[in-house]
Amino acid sequence: MVPGDGIGKEVTAEAVKVLGATGAPLELTHFDWGADRYLKDGTTIPADGFQMLGRDFDAILFGALGDPRVPSNLHAKEILLGMRFKMDLYANVRPVKLLDASLCPLKNVEPADVDFVIVRENTEGVYVDMGGVLKPGTPDEVATQEDINTRKGVERIIRFAFELAKKQRRKKVLMADKSNVMTYAGGLWQRVFKQVGEEYLGIERQHMFVDALCLHLVRDPRQFNVIVTNNMFGDIITDLAAALQGGLGMAASGNIHPGRTSLFEPVHGSAPPFAGKNIANPVGAILSAALMLEFLGLPAEAERINAAVLESVRQKKTTQDIGGTLGTREVGNWIAAKV
Ligand code: NAD
Ligand code: IPM
Ligand code: MN
């Protein structure tokens, strides 16, 4: 458990409550990594932190990081991006599922119309922090930010997307890029997508430029099954996709390296203006805990959480962001009781 900052602490407390209600045989250890700890003694994550997580734990349930008292966001970078990169959690899996028509901002959309998975590359792209500044602060200033795409990285994320489609019996994998402009990186993604896709008979391959994908996600989300894309495009389209399912409070994710210690977290951040007010929606964190149970080989327990969340939405036992009147804790209590 790494609750982190702001509403991260509140929503993970509810996820723990719900996990407890499933009776799943879990042993939880809490780590206080986050802004408070960083401001107190300078620790972001202890020196052997990543090794220790990989060695001593099966999974990590994470809240969010980000605090206005740390404007550089250094601790978030070191802890969250540190876990993703140093533990090589290359597949960021973000399911997009509408639980009730009333939650979708689009007209005439039913729950069955919004049901797809975004697979975001999680260890490369512009997130690698390569680049630099020349002559900073002068009129001649130059900034570069490198976009890293390796054959190995592109191949394994595309393969992951096809394997996920196969496992979940989804018919299509769509790869989104900007290969009309970013020709070198896009070319690599295009070639690998074709090559790997040819191994998966019966799964259709589709391609869209990422700008057009944004349009089609809003115009007609029905057509999507599995979407695979790079780190930055994946970051952007998963916030857009979160809106389709009722907002950031509803969106869950897993940062996965199959067979290794993996990380589960809501898609949202620490939402500082909401912190400590018992108003944050805990569903994204609770559904992330369900993804974690599935990963740990406890699908029945995961399914009970998903069913209880669905029922809470149907009965409007929800927080204000999705039209209810309950607080964070009360939603957690209701879902835990249902489980
Ligand atoms: P945010 O996700 O924290 O909040 C954006 C808005 O989304 C909120 O103002 C709120 O309207 C809504 N929202 C988010 N979570 C919600 C919830 N559980 N219930 C109801 N509404 C919710 O994004 P931000 O404001 O851009 O970032 C705040 C801080 O969080 C920054 O420091 C940012 O870097 C960090 N952040 C961290 C993560 C992470 O740890 N994974 C992810 C995104 C942002
Ligand atoms: C996310 C967040 C992170 C990202 C930030 C907080 C570094 O936006 O998990 O989507 O960009 O990946
Ligand atoms: Mn994001």
Image (cartoon, helix red, strand yellow):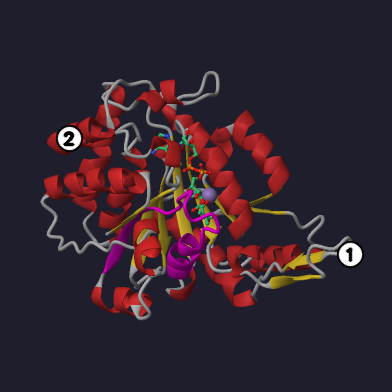
The foreground one among 192 and 285 is 285
Q: Is residue 174 visible?
A: no
Residue 164 % position (x, y)? 44, 57
The foreground one among 263 and 113 is 263
Q: Is residue 216 left or right of residue 91?
A: right
Query: Residue 242 bears which disc, if any?
Result: none
* Residue where numbered disc 2 is placed: 333
**What amino acid type is highlighted by mark number 2?**
Asn
Q: Is residue 65 magenta?
A: yes
Figure quadrant of the C terminus:
top left
Query: Residue at coordinates 53% horizontally, 63% vertically from top-left?
Result: 122
Query: Residue at coordinates 27% horizontally, 29% vertically from top-left?
Result: 327
Badge 1 density bin: few <14, some 14–19, many ≥20, Cα 10 Å? few
Magenta stretch: give its range.
58-84
Mark 1 to mark 2 CA distance (whole Å): 58 Å
Is 9 situated above or below 160? above
Residue 194 % position (x, y)? 66, 64
Q: Quadrant of residue 145?
A: bottom right
Q: Is residue 265 magenta?
A: no
Q: Is residue 307 visible?
A: yes
Is 66 situated above or below 224? below
* Residue where numbered disc 1 is placed: 140
